[in-house]
Amino acid sequence: MRFENTHLKRNNFILKQEGLAKLYLHKNDSVSIPSKSMNVFYNEKMEINRDISILAIKAYNNIFYQEPLEIVDCMSGTGVTSLRLLKNSINIEKIYINDINPVAVNLIEKNLELNDIASNRIALSNKDANLLFTEISQKNRLPDVISIDPFGTPNIYVDSAFKAIKKNDGLMCITATDTAVLFGVRPKACIRKYMSKPIHSEYCKEVGARILLYFISRIANINNSGITPLLTFYSNHFIRVFALTYRGKTRIQENSLNSYGYLIHCKKCGYRTIISEYRLGNPHVCPLCLNNDDLYYSGPLWIKEIHQKLFLDEITRLNEQLAIKNKKRFDKLINYALQEINMPISYYNIHKLCQQLKLSYIPKLDNLINLIKENGYRASRTHFDFLSIKTNMRIDDFKSLLSQIEK
């Protein structure tokens, strides 16, 4: 008897549609706040994560590797991401659909049946993700794409994932949802988990993303690989990184020297700068307020580009073609991400800055950006915070400009 006609389904399951995929959810899980206690983990608010993953994998297939893909979805939950990849006609030769929860694997079987998906391209398993990566790493054909999407930190899976993915032009997709750690609310936990000191500031989302990139890159280096970030995406309290792998000791060494650095931030006046090397013990004084008591450092972190224009342009094009719910939101987010390319690290929240200066008038961001450019500086929006702008204008000059606008 088919699953959808059973008494079990009618009483304990609900049917949901996401994109082109249909899926069963345990009824109790559909009304739960997402937690590890769910029968099978599913977070409806993370649909945007799954949307961007589908766009990114398709863009990767179009640009970097045009052959049929071998994909690993190591923490599948309900199987919704894999279902959507298969239903969107992504060029897939084989997809590993795995979850450590046996209840989840049973539900994935039913959801595959529900969507009439043949099993010839699917390797369904009930294993720890690290065990799965270890087994895959021993095969002749290493996967092209690995997706790590945990509840919390991805740190314990990254090393074994880099052992399993192909070393040239593989796509690593990694999510972190422990944003309180990366954003400096729990700095000791960040040092322990990511080997980097965070900062809790108005621009902590970008710093947290760059700490995650630094960590991923260092683990890649240990495995004789390097990464090129294609898209580093923040939304809804998660960070999702899409990075291309490469190999070659000389290239890895040269890029590592140039890609890692530290942020210096003055908590008194808001001055900030990036340095490629930080020597502990050397005196540092803020060049603006001559203060050293409130001078703070964060890092090490990734200090090079976090997006690639070619990749973002392809995502924008694909957004019009694929079954994506949040099309207008993605256009806005990707447009702002494009503006971030070649801009300085950090940004200024205009509302907070005007409040700090006790200004009654808050200028429109686009007008302010144009005014900054008229003064000979660079400025842009940022996808990390819709109320903020990036600029290479020094903060004291920026404050003076805001005060002049009000006058």
Image (cartoon, rainbow, N blue to C red):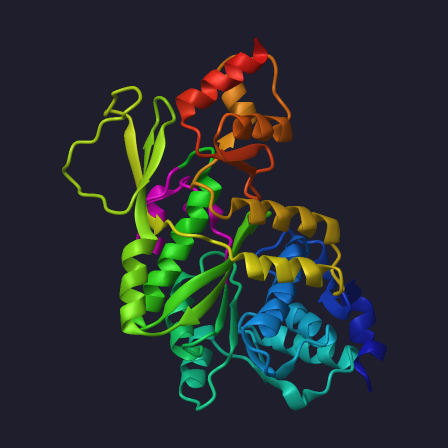
Residue at 62% x, 51% y: name it.
334
The image quadrant that residue 101 belongs to is: bottom right
| Residue 186 falls inside the magenta stretch | yes
**In the foreground, 62 or 89:** 62
Residue 197 place in picture, x, y as percent: 32, 45
Residue found 83% across the figure and 70% down from its top: 10
Indicate whether 70 appears above or below 45.
Answer: below
- Residue at 81%, 84% (x, y): give it: 2
In the image, residue 269 lies at what x, y percent?
36, 22
Name the quadrant containing residue 115.
bottom right
Residue depicted at x 27% and y 65%: 253
Relative to 159, 87 lies left or right: right
Position of residue 283 measured from the top left corner of the image (x, y, whole percent): 16, 32
Query: Is 36 on the left or on the right of 224, as rendered?
Result: right
Direction from residue 346 to residue 37 in the image, left or right: right
Residue 278 in the image: x percent, y percent? 22, 44
Is 61 covered by the magenta stretch? Answer: no
- Quadrant assignment for the N terminus: bottom right
Taking the view exactly as shown, the residue that stands out farthest to the left is: 281
Q: Is residue 196 visible?
A: no
Q: How many marks?
A: 0
Can residue 201 be spotted in the picture? yes
Q: Nearer the viewer, residue 116 or 293?
A: 293
The magenta segment: 174-199
Which of the image's four quarters has the C terminus? top right
Q: Furthest residue to the right?
A: 5
